[in-house]
Structure formats: C-alpha cells, structure tokens
Image (cartoon, rainbow, N blue to C red):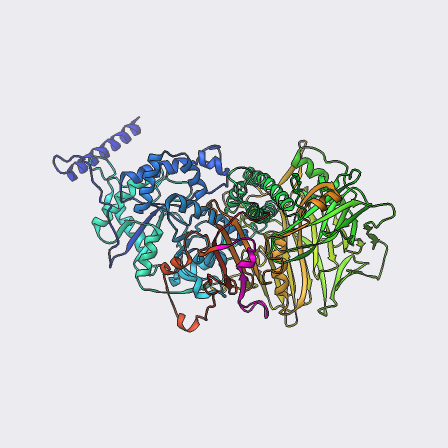
C-alpha cells in the first residue's frame, strides 16, 4: 500500500507541475479562436519551394475487383472505396479555392461521373478549369510497362484522353506512372512525348540505381527512349527520392499515425513549431538530393482521401505556419506547376537512354517473375487485343451503328486489363477471374459485330446482285483447345463448310489454317473454286486432354465426340480483307485431303531424322530424341541447335533472407538449373502442307514443333501442366534454345513489342552493378521476341504473349513459360501464385498452351522476319464459319474482299495499327513504321502510304494529323512542347528524321523509322462499302 500511495502522489505532483507550467505559458485571458489559414502561397524565388501534390493512387483492381474498389465492397480484404475518395475530395476542394488535387484513373472517374447531378458536374468543371482539380496522365488505368503490347497501351490511353476531351475539353501535360514495377523505353517516348506530355514522374527504380542517383543528384533527367526518334521525342522525367507517399511523419488519413499540427493553445500538446521544424528538416533533406530550388512532396498514397478533410486540414496548417516561419516556402501544387517551375530554372539535365528494367527493391528481390505470372491471362489479353483490332476494322467497313453490337465493351475490358496489377499477373485470383470475365463479355459483343459485318460484306460485295439472305457466321474462341463446333460438325447432304479468313494487316498473307474436323474424307477449295492441297493430322494426347477438361471448365458441359483430325491448308488472304474457303465431303472418286504419314523414333539408334518440306530442314537425333541441327538451303545457314525444358525451384524464403519467389519476385532456389535428362521418343507427322514433331518430355510437358512448307521458321507449340507440386516445391518452367554462337554476354529484347534494346549480362548502363541474383537479375520482359547474334549468324525467338527471358549463357536464349508457387513474396498481394482449374469440385494446377517461333539467319538479315512475323503473330487470321450449299455460296456471296485498292499493299515496313470509325463519324487512322534506324539495310528508310489507295471507295475531304491519342492537333502539340536543356547535348544529338506534312492533294503519308502517325480523316461519303 505504501508503494501505491507514493506512485499516486508522484503522478499528482507531475500533473500539478505541468498545469502550472502551462498556465505560465498562456497569456492572461487566452482563448481559442477561428484561424483563417493562408493557403494562397505561390512560388517564391530564392527559397526552397515545397510543392505539395495531393493525390490518391487507386488501383483499377488488385486485392479487390475494380467495381469492389469503386463501391467499397469486400472490405474484409481492404477498406477502400474510391467513390468516397471522389465525393470527399470534390467537397474539400469546393471549400477552399487554393486547394488542389490530381486524379489519374479514368476508369474510376468515369464511373463516378455518370452518377453525378448536372449541378455538381458544372461545379466539377469549374474546379477543372480553375486548375484545382487536374487530371494527370488520363489513361483508363495506370498501365503496366513490362507486359502490355504498345498497341494496347495506345488504345487504353486514347480511351481515357477522349473521355476527358469530350467532357472537359482538356488535354494532358504530365505522365504519372508512380507504381509500375520498372519503366519501359516505349513509355518515355511513345506514351509520353508523343502524347504531348512535358514530363513524366514515377517512383520505382532499382535500389542500386536510386542510391547512385540520390548521391549524384540525377533523380531528374531528360529521357530519350527511342534511338530512332532521339531528341524529337524526349521527356523530362522525375524519379521520386523515396516511394510515392509523403516523407515520414506527413501522412494524414483519418487513422494514420503521423502527428497532426495542434494549434489550439487551450489544448494539450500544442506543437506548431515542432511540426514546422519537422517540415523544414524534411524539405532540406530532399533539396539536398534535388537540382533547383523546387521539390515535390506526394501528399497521398494508395486509396487515400476517403475523408479528404483529414489531409487538407493539415496541409492548410502546414502551408500557413511554414510560410510564417519563412525558412522554406510551401504551396499547393500539381505536377504541371512543378514541371513549369523546373523548366523556368533553365537547368541543364542529365540524359537517360534505354529503360529502367529490371527493378529490384532488395538484393534478392528482382521483380522479374511477373513478366510471366498468369500466362493464361497474358495470352487471353493478347488474343482479345488482336480480335479488337480486326473488329474495329470490320465495324468501319460495315458502318458504326448506335444500335446493335459494338466493340465498346471489349475496348473497356482491354483498357482495364492493361493495369499494372492486371496483365502483369500480380492480382489476386478472384480479380484475375474478373478481368477475364470482362474480356469474355466484351468478346461476345464484338463477336456479333464481326459476324454481322462479314455477312454484310460477303453479301453486298457479291457480283450477282443477290445478297438478300442473311448469313449466320459462327466463330471459335476455344479453337486453342481444339474445340470448334462448326468445323467439327458432320456435313449434311449437299452442304459445305464455308471458312471466311480475315486479314487485319495491310499486306497479303499466305498462312496455314488448321481446324478440327470429324471426317477424314474432305476436300478444300479456294475462293475461285480450285481444289487445293490439304492435310490431315491427328490430335495429340495433350490436345485431346485439354479439350476434354477445359471445355467442361469453361462451358460447364462436356464436349461432343472429339474430332479425329486437324485439317490443315494454306490460305492466301488479301490485305485488310478476307478470302473464303470451302470444305466439302469428298466424292468417292474425287480428290481428298491426305492423311499425314507417321514415324516414331522409338527403337531407332544412330539415326538422323530430317523434318521439313521446304527450304528449312530440322535435323533430330533419333537416339537422343532431340533437335540437333538447323539447315536453310535458301540462305545457306547451317547451325547446331538444341532445345530443352527445365525448371527453377522457387525459393521459399526460409534461408537467411526471407525473400520468397512469388507473383512479383523471381528468386530461384540458388542458381542450379534442374533439367529432365531422360530420352524423349519422337513422333513425326509428314505431309504436303507441313511436318510436325510430337514430343512428350514427361507427364506434364509436351510440345509439337511445326515446319511449314512455305516458311523458314519453326513453330513450337508447348503444353505445360498441371505442374506437379506433390513435393511441396514451387516450380518455374523455362525453355532454352542453345547454339554454339559466341554472343559476348549480349542479347536484344523488345520494349512493349516496339524497339529492341541491347542487354548485356550482369551489366547496367547507368551504374556499376553489384550482382546478387545472376539469374533473376538478368531477366527482362518481352512482348515480341529476343535475339542474339555473333559475327556470322543471328538466332531469333518470337513469342505469342508477354514472357520473361534472358540469355544466361552465350549463344542461348531462355524463356520462362509458366510458374506455380507456394509462397507469397511479401509485396502486398497476400496470396500465393497457385493457379488451378476446377471441374466438378476437383481442382488441379492450370495447364498452359502457347507458342514460340524460332529462326536462324545470316547476321543482319533477321530483322525482316522478326518484324513481319511479329506482326502476323500479334494479328492472327480471324476465322468465321457457316454451312451452306456450295453452289449457292459461290453464286450469292463475294468470296474475297479487300478494303484497300486491289492493286495496292502497304509497304513491308508499315502497319495499320488503328482503323476505327469514331462516334462523330470521323475515322481514326494510325500508321506505324516497324523498323528502327539502322535495323535493316532495306527497310530502315522513309516509307510512303497512299491514302487514296487505302480508302479507294471513299472521297477524302480532310486529313488532320493528331497527337498519338488524337486529342489535339499535332501542330498545336508541337508548338506547346517544352524544349529542355540537356548536358552535353550539342555534341551528342544526332539528326532526327521525321515524315513530312501530308500534301492535301496527293494525300501521301511519309513515315520515318519508328514513327507512328495518327490522323483523323473526314470523308464526303462514309458508308460506301458494299453499295
């Protein structure tokens, strides 16, 4: 009791002393009063200006789906409601005209905007016009920079830019990519400067790079992402000194732990001067690593401002009291204001080239696993993207309609899928399913449009004058798992299967079509009615297994009796047009498709098996069951080559460093490659159209290698899964293509399917790399392909979706194809990357089927194939089916169609990447030069496109060149562009070549290497196709 009494007396004495002290500090008669905080501050010359930029980073799906985040559902996962953010911010901005806020994700804002009253919309427009509310970047999402294709990046950005232009009449100035996990060269020049942006800001760069830049004051640079466009497409780039949140101690969400300013003198803990001192100290610390007297504080982070006054109240106080203190100047600002201040300083900035990959935030944490994570979703996004390109073209030829099916839903779904936690594969499983469902819904709408457009064109283009019947086309979205009901159906008496093949590229294509059929006695006729070579190939065991299981998983029903064969035939299709092929039951005495000859290597020894009917021959070793040699009789290239599969065991994070391999991070367990060494028997299928080599490496890895008669590359279709995990170990599956080439640690990988960037193993151009992870640290993203070369030859591998890859050994290319892991990598997603497919309550690991393509050329000759085949892989031929009487079809339908002049094709170095009729009746056209400066001796040159021949049936009345997102005229964009000073630029800057202005009479468009030009075209008569 005595001890307790003493303690109580001690507390009482301390409390009395504090009260006396407080009373002594307070003036007699002190009282709390209203304080009018002065938030009017602007930039003050000669002082450190702290630009406070209020923002909320709102992921368009991650732990929750996009709609769950918007409405605030599923809050057991995370308490986040973007609707509350926007409601609260708008209310707070209306309270004080000096407050500012920036917003990025238009997918969320569009949802919110639809629900607002006309009166509030007027107020919001006033906030935008006054600069209080500024839209930054303006894409539908903050897209990933490693795993999307550049066409998808353009499309999602355009969708957001057009929405803001329509609703607010504004164009953006600033790129804001604060959260993606590394940054691409295409982002800098294409999704930055070519949009008219003056600056770009982001947070995530390699921890070693950041340390060096902090030391050298090079966090802010001029970034030239394209060696072809160089200074004509550079951008001021700011890298945050830490993450995209405020300095420590300055986060003010309602439940954050930072100490607020307490300025009521009647309350305890009055701390104005202490907090001002904290602010000034943090400002000086950042100024010490930043050039000029302007620094930016990002006042916000993920899903903040759900109660915006908790932030703005504190920022109001800091601006008021810090500026009274006078040591630094604090102001409400935006990245645009900050950019202008940096420009006005007339500083010379360091030059940055290439990109910011790979990204590591820790010695053993390279974020290179997500280059491959969720390969099925990555493949689905790419497939839907190519379908969307074709559907937009057909919508243009048919004529856009306000009623009926459109491509709008697919456009929205694809835009959201480019988010940096979507196609990246770093979202939770239920969110990945949501993205896929949205794509599927969008596809179903676009499928109707494609079918009706093809019916319209085939009927109205008929020379017979008929065409009053309605053709019902079917399509096969599950053709990749050998499921295509219209081609599998047994043909009824007198009926034929009509296959319409659409080509969305601007040049004629000759490619082999493969469709499953149930009858071996079939013939194929081309558009002119001539019988053509056709070949029957048996379905592999892997294909039959996939079909059986996955049709049930996707459709909820078992498929019909499996087809017996693949029917393969060569199709010739005109540019931006279609050809028709007729598959009929063979007459008893007539010609029929040939069944492939089968050969197996089992039991053979010391024998070489040659595969290929044309110039390309692949030699296999029968006793080892492996590829051994590549021979091209036309180019005279002969090379030893092997192909193998292996897997890395995913690190479980139980060693001294608890970093595991997961959705983001690739951390192999040590650096030991585990290979399957057993003998692999071969089955070879030979025929008049193509040869196939079937290999079953183990129960869960198989492949089919195809060599087409008229092609000089090998197509490898792999099937991987279900990856076994009975041993409790996660696995990351790779393939290697190995040659004897001396490549000196050097390889080349694409940036978002566009420019190729030189990579050197264990090397970075910007700093001396400390190598901690020699495998993961040398992985880079690829959307087009990878190649290596020596003094005589070059090996190229092209891919059908985003993958991670490298050249870890000279002369070798490695691709990661699939991942299945059992540990979270502690980067926020909180879920292991263990994708499964469930059928009748039985779940197994996800099986992946995909393709890659291999070719070896003489050095300097590979670019032609990479660029041409890359376009064809990214834009596969679109197939539509109908069953009709053969004679009726030929008499009543057009068997071929081309949207361009029949005597014309685009130059081989030019692609149409957008052809779309807009709501206002104008047509959006984008043309892209496919080659870089110096990439190819024939095609890295200026090229011309004749618009009159591109639109032969329409009279062009006006052609207006626009910015990349078509939200401002190019000429106006160039007038506004800020010209930055670069350190040593006079000596280094090469001459930049650009296409000239379009002559309004000749209507010739000129494109220089790597140039993309965007036009809005007005026609006197828009709907003339088929008239």
1004 lies left or right of 821: left
Res. 876 visible in picture: no
First to last magenta residue range:
933-956
Foreground pick, 247 / 427: 427
Res. 317 visible in picture: yes
* Residue 623 part of the magenta segment: no
Residue 963 horizontal/vertical position (percent): 44, 55
Q: Quadrant of the N terminus?
A: top left
The part of the image, by quadrant, that contains residue 437 is top right
Foreground pick, 224 / 388: 388
32 lies left or right of 105: left
Depicted 616 relative to depicted 551: above or below = below
Foreground pick, 150 / 506: 506
Residue 46 horizontal/vertical position (percent): 24, 59
Q: Residue furthest right?
A: 589
> How would you classify the magenta stretch by its main secondary structure?
loop
Q: Residue furthest bottom?
A: 987
Foreground pick, 785 / 508: 508
Q: Residue furthest front?
A: 465
Q: Residue furthest left?
A: 28
214 lies left or right of 182: left
Total residue callouts? 0
Depicted 68 relative to depicted 231: above or below = above
Residue 960 horizontal/vertical position (percent): 44, 56
Residue 3 horizontal/vertical position (percent): 30, 29
């Amino acid at each position: 009791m005595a001890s307790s009494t003493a303690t109580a007396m001690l507390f009482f004495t301390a409390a009395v002393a504090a009260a006396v002290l407080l009373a002594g500090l307070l003036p007699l008669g002190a009282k709390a009063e209203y304080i009018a905080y002065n938030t009017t501050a602007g930039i003050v010359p000669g002082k450190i200006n702290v630009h406070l930029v209020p923002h909320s980073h709102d992921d368009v799906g991650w732990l929750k789906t996009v709609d769950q985040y918007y409405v605030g559902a599923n809050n057991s996962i995370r308490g986040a409601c973007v609707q509350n953010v926007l409601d609260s911010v708008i209310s707070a901005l209306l309270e004080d005209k000096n407050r500012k806020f920036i917003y990025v994700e238009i997918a969320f804002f569009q949802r919110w905007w639809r629900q607002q009253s006309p009166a509030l919309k007027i107020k919001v427009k006033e906030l935008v016009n006054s600069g209080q509310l500024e839209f930054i970047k303006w894409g539908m999402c903050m897209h990933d920079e490693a795993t999307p294709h550049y066409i998808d990046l353009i499309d999602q950005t355009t969708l957001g830019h057009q929405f803001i232009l329509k609703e607010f009449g504004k164009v953006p100035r600033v790129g804001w990519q604060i959260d993606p996990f590394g940054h691409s060269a295409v982002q800098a020049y294409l999704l930055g400067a070519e949009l008219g942006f003056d600056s770009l800001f982001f947070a995530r760069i390699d921890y070693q790079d950041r340390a060096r830049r902090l030391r050298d004051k090079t966090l802010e640079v001029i970034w030239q992402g394209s060696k072809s466009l160089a200074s004509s497409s550079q951008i001021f780039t700011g890298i945050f000194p830490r993450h995209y949140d405020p300095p420590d101690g300055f986060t003010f969400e309602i439940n954050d732990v930072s100490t607020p300013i307490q300025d009521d003198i009647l309350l305890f803990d009055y701390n104005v001067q202490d907090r001002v001192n904290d602010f000034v100290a943090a400002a000086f610390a950042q100024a010490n690593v930043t050039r000029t007297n302007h620094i930016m504080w990002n006042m916000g982070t993920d899903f903040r401002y759900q109660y915006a006054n908790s932030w703005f109240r504190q920022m109001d106080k800091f601006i008021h009291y810090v500026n009274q203190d006078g040591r630094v100047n604090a102001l409400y600002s935006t990245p645009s204001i900050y950019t202008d201040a940096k420009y006005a300083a007339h500083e010379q900035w360091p030059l940055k080239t290439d990109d910011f990959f790979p990204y590591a935030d820790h010695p053993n944490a390279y974020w290179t696993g997500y280059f491959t994570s969720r390969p099925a979703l990555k493949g689905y996004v790419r497939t839907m993207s190519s379908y969307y390109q074709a559907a937009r073209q057909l919508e243009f030829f048919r004529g856009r309609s306000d009623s009926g099916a459109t491509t709008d839903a697919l456009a929205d779904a694809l835009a959201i899928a480019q988010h940096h936690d979507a196609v990246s594969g770093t979202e939770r499983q239920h969110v990945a399913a949501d993205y896929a469902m949205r794509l599927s819904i969008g596809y179903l709408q676009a499928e109707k449009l494609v079918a009706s457009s093809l019916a319209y064109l085939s009927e109205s283009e008929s020379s017979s004058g008929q065409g009053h019947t309605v053709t019902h086309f079917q399509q096969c979205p599950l053709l990749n798992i050998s499921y295509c009901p219209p081609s599998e159906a047994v043909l009824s008496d007198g009926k034929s299967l009509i296959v319409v093949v659409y080509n969305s590229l601007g040049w004629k294509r000759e490619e082999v079509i493969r469709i499953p059929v149930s009858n071996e006695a079939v013939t194929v006729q081309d558009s002119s009615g001539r019988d053509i070579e056709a070949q029957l190939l048996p379905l592999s065991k892997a294909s039959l297994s996939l079909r059986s299981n996955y049709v049930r998983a996707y459709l909820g029903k078992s498929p019909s009796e499996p087809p017996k064969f693949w029917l393969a035939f060569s199709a010739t299709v005109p540019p931006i047009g279609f050809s028709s092929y007729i598959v009929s039951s063979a007459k008893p005495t007539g010609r029929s498709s040939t069944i492939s000859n089968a050969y197996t290597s089992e039991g053979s020894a010391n024998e070489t098996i040659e595969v290929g009917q044309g110039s390309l021959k692949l030699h296999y070793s029968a006793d080892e069951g492996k590829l051994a040699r590549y021979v091209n009789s036309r180019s005279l290239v002969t090379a030893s080559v092997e192909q193998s599969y292996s897997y890395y065991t995913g690190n479980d994070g139980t060693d001294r460093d608890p970093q595991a391999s997961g959705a983001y991070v690739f951390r192999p367990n040590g650096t030991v490659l585990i290979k399957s060494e057993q003998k692999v028997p071969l089955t070879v299928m030979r025929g008049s159209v193509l040869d196939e080599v079937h290999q079953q490496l183990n129960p869960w890895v198989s492949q089919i290698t195809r060599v087409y008669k008229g092609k000089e590359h090998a197509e490898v279709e792999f099937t991987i899964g279900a990856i076994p995990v009975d041993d409790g170990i996660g696995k990351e599956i790779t393939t290697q293509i190995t040659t004897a080439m001396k490549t000196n640690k050097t390889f080349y990988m694409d940036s978002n399917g566009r420019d190729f960037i030189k990579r050197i193993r264990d090397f970075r151009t910007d700093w001396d790399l400390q190598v901690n992870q020699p495998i993961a640290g040398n992985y880079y993203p690829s959307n087009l392909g990878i190649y290596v070369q020596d003094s005589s030859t070059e090996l190229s591998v092209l891919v059908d979706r985003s993958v991670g890859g490298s050249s870890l050994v000279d002369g070798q290319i490695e691709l990661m194809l699939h991942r299945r892991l059992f540990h979270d990598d502690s980067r926020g997603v909180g879920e292991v990357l263990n994708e499964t497919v469930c059928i009748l309550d039985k779940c197994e690991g996800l099986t992946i089927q995909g393709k890659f393509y291999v070719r070896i050329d003489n050095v300097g000759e590979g670019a032609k194939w990479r660029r041409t085949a890359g376009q064809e892989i990214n834009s596969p031929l679109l197939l539509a089916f109908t069953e009709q009487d053969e004679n009726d079809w030929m008499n009543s339908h057009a068997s071929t169609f081309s949207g361009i002049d029949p005597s014309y094709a685009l130059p081989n170095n030019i692609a149409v990447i957008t052809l779309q009729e807009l709501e206002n009746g104008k047509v959006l056209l984008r043309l892209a030069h496919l080659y870089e400066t110096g990439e190819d001796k024939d095609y890295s040159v200026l090229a011309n496109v004749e618009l009159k021949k591109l639109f032969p049936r329409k009279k062009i009345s006006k052609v207006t060149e626009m910015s990349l997102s078509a939200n401002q005229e190019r000429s106006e964009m160039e007038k506004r562009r800020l010209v930055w000073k670069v350190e040593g630029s006079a000596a280094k800057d090469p001459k930049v070549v650009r296409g000239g202005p379009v002559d309004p009479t000749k209507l010739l468009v000129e494109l220089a290497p790597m140039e993309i030009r965007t036009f809005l075209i007005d026609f006197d008569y828009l709907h003339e196709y088929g008239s």
